[in-house]
Image (cartoon, helix red, strand yellow):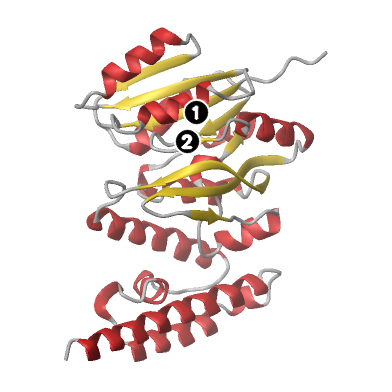
Amino acid sequence: MKRAPLVSVVMPVRNGELYVDDAIRSVCEQTYPHWELVVVDDGSTDRTPNLLSRWVASDPRIRVIRQKPLGLVAASNAGIAATQGEYIARLDSDDVASRHRLRIQVAVMESRRDLVVLGSAIRLFGARRGILLTPMTDWGCRGRLLFENCFAHSSVMMRKSCITSLEPLYQASTEFSEDYGVWVRLTKVGRFANLPLPLVKYRVHARQISREKAERLRQAHAEIVTSMWRSWGVDVSEDRFLRVRWPDFGGATYGEFLRDARYLSGALGPLWRSRHAPHVMVWLLLVVARGSLKAVSARIAEKANR
């Protein structure tokens, strides 16, 4: 009888004293018992080191790597380098995995040997509530990747044998959108899928992202997208993409936004002629609707303040 595969859960953390206990507890309560947890403490200065020491003492499957504060990319790569499992699962230190997450994902990965990455829907909790769905099929994931991230990072399970050729997996050049960059590179390795079940609770809280970090994330996102588009023969500047994707970026007027959106629609010609034409249409409709809504809201607010 084949031995159940080991799953390595990788969890980077820095100053996570408020939530890291919940995240680790959710791994310890998994119904799938064949796991190890590799926590990378990225130079925490709060109570995180003490909390981690207690967990290590309570369960031999938990290991902690301590490093000076080098950032999420370095911490993620250090965690992956230390794994021993056949599968690598990510979990952020402020999120919570459902009890059956590993069991369900391992069963799917074992039955579909063509899969490189398997994610899932996520349940938002904290400051926001709801369920965030992700594309289920490989075609859907690849189409979404042309414009947006197709995975909730905290939900993914990766086949380790398929990612070792990409070491280091996470690249400093794509910091703030480091996972998006990974999925783009892995499109050449194998297939993607997401499960419709919300296997992770994604915590939304005030400490999550600063305004400065949000802007840097947008810039990194734009670099990845426009670079990918160039491989399709689409030449669009990062600034133009940013003005369409985030209409509040750069203070553009609504008229300028519509002009950029029309230009983008034409520039995406090679994608319109590909199998991803439906994804192009849906994405453009969504960004135009979002931009129009922002413009209407701004006008209503302006009139109310007169």
Disc 2 marks which residue?
A: 96
Q: Nearer the viewer, residue 33 or 246?
A: 33
| Rendered location of residue 234, percent (x, y) | 52, 73
| Rendered location of residue 267, percent (x, y) | 52, 80
Instruction: Name which residue type carries label 1.
Output: Ser
Disc 1 marks which residue?
A: 26
* Residue that appears at 55% across and 73% down: 283
* Residue that appears at 79% across and 34% down: 111
Badge 2 crowding class, 10 Å Cα cut-off, few under 14, some 14 to 19, many 20 or more, is many
Instruction: Name which residue type carries label 2.
Output: Val
Number of numbered discs present?
A: 2
Badge 1 crowding class, 10 Å Cα cut-off, few under 14, some 14 to 19, many 20 or more, is some
Seen in the picture, residue 12 relative to 289 is either above or below; the reply is: above
| Rendered location of residue 79, percent (x, y) | 43, 26
Residue 22 in view (yes/no): yes
Task: Locate residue 293 relative to residue 275 in the image: left or right.
Answer: left
Task: Locate residue 97 relative to residue 135 in the image: left or right.
Answer: left
Seen in the picture, residue 30 relative to 156 is either above or below; the reply is: above
Q: Nearer the viewer, residue 275 or 215?
A: 215
* Residue that appears at 51% across and 67% down: 230
Marks 1/2: CA distance?
6 Å
User: Disc 1 on helix, strand or loop?
Assistant: helix
The answer to whether the residue labelled 1 contacts the one labelled 2, judged by CB atoms less than 8 Å apart, is yes
The quarter of the picture where the N terminus appears is: top right
Q: Nearer the viewer, residue 257 or 128?
A: 128
Q: Earlier in the sequence, mark 1 or mark 2?
A: 1
| Rendered location of residue 203, percent (x, y) | 41, 44
Q: Residue furthest left?
A: 306
